[in-house]
Image: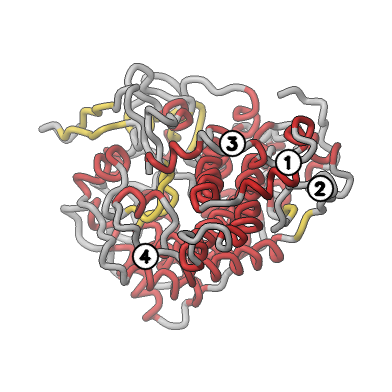
């Protein structure tokens, strides 16, 4: 993957959201732009820009903020100020910088540019065959779909374009499309990608760091789950689960192999970082590192071992669920400051188990940087479990869902009995179990808020997640009111985008919000 990252440095200026600055320098830019697409390596360098766009700080920050910060998992850490603090305290306005979606639209434009021009290279470079073109197109379609998937989960209705921004003659003002329209396009892109995506690259780093058929199926399973197409979700999950190249690591090695070393046997797709090319600053700043062990974010006390809302030490009936869970010891620990626990996941090399059952955290140094995992095998296992529970055609669906939950649960609860069906005999209790297990397994991976929003979409009721979120709120009734309106659970459109695009209509929840609030 390092070779791909090095290619990023040669991307041309036209691979930005617009081309106006370049046009100021090159009046004959349309000819120059078309003349660029002559060789396979030139096409590949633009595709590399799609990946490069996703590992930028601004993109990773939004994956983390949109997917995790508003959830029950995250509270104030060592220091958090400005727009993150406003999100944390339910005080979001249209001037909040995390309402800026431009980094994902830059990636989308890289993909659109590649898909527009790359087919012409087949006739100019005899080494660039139709087969090679289609496999690269599969990557571009999948990355475009992934970018739109982040946008639709964060904003719901967003502008949809499949054309590149390459000419001054184009109309750049585009209205929002409904989430259903965007989701249909995402599915269409991924279905095309499924036809041509590589199963492997015969290169271990590429198999985890570039789009493969496994990655396409993972995104598509996630989209189907959001769109309540549960049979289709299960079908995609089955294809992934039948892939014998994927295998969960042992519970004892989970922290080190998956989140420190990276590209583990259970990884499906992770954004590749290299300290000599691109450092993962956001994980370091938010989660901590040696010398700054409490990051800007902390894990909530009320979700800890003795917390009132903890997913650990949970007590259904007479069974003590997750009482000695390795994830409770390895994913977070005692904080030195802040409002909650230190976050260990991504920040550590490993935890050393002591004789008194405590652990000693060994932090990664500032000279190492982690990848950011987008999909891994346990996520897929629990997606299938969630889809089965929602189908609930008979007890067999619920029993199969429980078996899937036990796959991830038992690897981190080595001395416990497996979870028993009599303790979760109906759809509601099994649904809660799956949601709880996803929380335990996927802590701090940018998943929890999106998981809660699926609960909202199914119930069409914002208050359905208040029981998870309310312990985090300060008691201010206004916070509860804001979190009780579905529109308020999505991000506003950045005011500056509305100012320059008269076709954009603000999320109605934020129409009367004071936009003068400074960032």
Q: Quadrant of residue 160?
A: bottom right
Question: How much space separates mark 4 and mark 2, taking CA atoms?
Answer: 37 Å
Of labels 3 and 2, earlier in sequence is: 2
Q: Quadrant of residue 364?
A: top left
Of labels 4 and 2, earlier in sequence is: 2
Mark 3 = which residue? 473
Q: Residue at x 55, y 23 (%)?
A: 80
Quarter containing the N terminus: top left
In this view of the protein, which residue sits in the foreground, 42 or 304? Answer: 42
Quarter containing the C terminus: top right
Find numbered disc 3 in the image and state the secondary structure of the residue it sits on: loop
Label drawn at residue 199: 4
Question: How much space separates mark 2 and mark 1, taking CA atoms?
Answer: 9 Å
Label drawn at residue 18: 1
Question: How much space separates mark 1 and mark 4, taking CA atoms?
Answer: 34 Å
In this view of the protein, which residue sits in the foreground, 411 or 290? Answer: 290
Label drawn at residue 98: none
Find numbered disc 1 in the image and state the secondary structure of the residue it sits on: loop
Label 1: few (<14), some or many (≥20) within 10 Å? Answer: some
Lateral position of residue 377 relative to residue 17, left or right: left
Question: How much space separates mark 4 and mark 3, taking CA atoms?
Answer: 45 Å
Question: How much space separates mark 3 and mark 2, taking CA atoms?
Answer: 40 Å
Lateral position of residue 157 relative to residue 369, left or right: right
Q: Do tag 1 and tag 4 residues touch (Cβ < 8 Å)?
A: no
Q: Do tag 4 and tag 2 residues touch (Cβ < 8 Å)?
A: no
Q: Do tag 2 and tag 1 residues touch (Cβ < 8 Å)?
A: yes
């Amino acid at each position: 993957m390092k070779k791909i990252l090095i290619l990023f440095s040669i991307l041309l200026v036209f691979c930005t959201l617009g081309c106006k600055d370049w046009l100021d320098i090159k009046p004959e830019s349309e000819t120059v732009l078309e003349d660029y697409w002559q060789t396979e390596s030139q096409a590949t360098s633009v595709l590399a820009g799609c990946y490069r766009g996703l590992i930028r700080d601004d993109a990773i920050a939004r994956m983390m903020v949109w997917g995790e910060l508003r959830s029950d998992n995250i509270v104030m850490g060592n220091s958090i100020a400005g727009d993150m603090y406003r999100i944390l305290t339910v005080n979001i306005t249209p001037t909040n910088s995390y309402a800026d979606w431009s980094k994902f639209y830059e990636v989308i434009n890289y993909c659109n540019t590649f898909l527009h021009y790359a087919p012409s290279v087949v006739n100019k470079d005899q080494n660039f065959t139709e087969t090679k073109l289609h496999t690269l197109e599969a990557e571009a379609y999948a990355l475009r779909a992934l970018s739109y998937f982040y946008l639709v989960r964060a904003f719901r209705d967003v502008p949809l374009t499949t054309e590149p921004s390459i000419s001054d003659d184009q109309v750049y003002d585009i209205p929002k499309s409904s989430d259903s329209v965007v989701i249909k396009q995402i599915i269409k892109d991924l279905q095309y990608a499924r036809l041509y995506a590589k199963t492997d690259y015969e290169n271990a780093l590429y198999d985890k760091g570039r789009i493969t058929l496994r990655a396409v199926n993972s995104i598509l399973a996630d989209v189907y789950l959001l769109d309540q197409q549960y049979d289709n979700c299960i079908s995609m999950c089955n294809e992934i689960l039948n892939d014998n190249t994927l295998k969960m690591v042992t519970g004892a090695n989970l922290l080190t192999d998956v989140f420190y070393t990276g590209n583990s046997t259970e990884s499906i797709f992770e954004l590749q970082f290299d300290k000599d090319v691109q450092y993962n600053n956001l994980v370091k700043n938010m989660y901590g590192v040696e010398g700054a062990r409490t990051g800007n974010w902390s894990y909530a006390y009320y979700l800890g071992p003795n917390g009132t809302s903890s997913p650990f030490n949970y007590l259904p009936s007479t069974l003590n669920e997750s009482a000695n869970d390795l994830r409770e010891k390895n994913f977070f620990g005692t904080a030195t400051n802040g409002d909650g626990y230190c976050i260990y996941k991504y920040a550590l090399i490993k935890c050393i188990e002591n004789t008194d059952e405590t652990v000693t955290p060994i932090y990664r140094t500032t000279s190492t940087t982690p990848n950011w995992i987008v999909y891994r095998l346990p996520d897929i296992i629990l997606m299938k479990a969630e889809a089965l529970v929602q189908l609930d055609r008979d007890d067999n669906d619920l029993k199969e869902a429980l078996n899937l939950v036990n796959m991830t649960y038992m690897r981190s609860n080595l001395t416990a009995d497996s979870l028993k069906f009599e303790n979760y005999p109906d759809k509601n209790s099994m649904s809660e179990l799956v949601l709880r297990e996803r929380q335990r397994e996927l802590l701090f991976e940018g998943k929890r808020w999106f998981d809660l929003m699926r609960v909202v979409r199914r119930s069409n009721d914002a208050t359905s997640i208040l029981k998870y979120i309310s312990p985090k709120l300060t008691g201010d009734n206004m916070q509860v009111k804001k979190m009780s309106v579905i529109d308020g659970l999505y991000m506003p459109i950045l005011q500056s985008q509305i100012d320059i695009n008269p076709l954009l209509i603000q999320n109605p929840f934020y129409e009367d919000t004071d936009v003068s609030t400074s960032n």
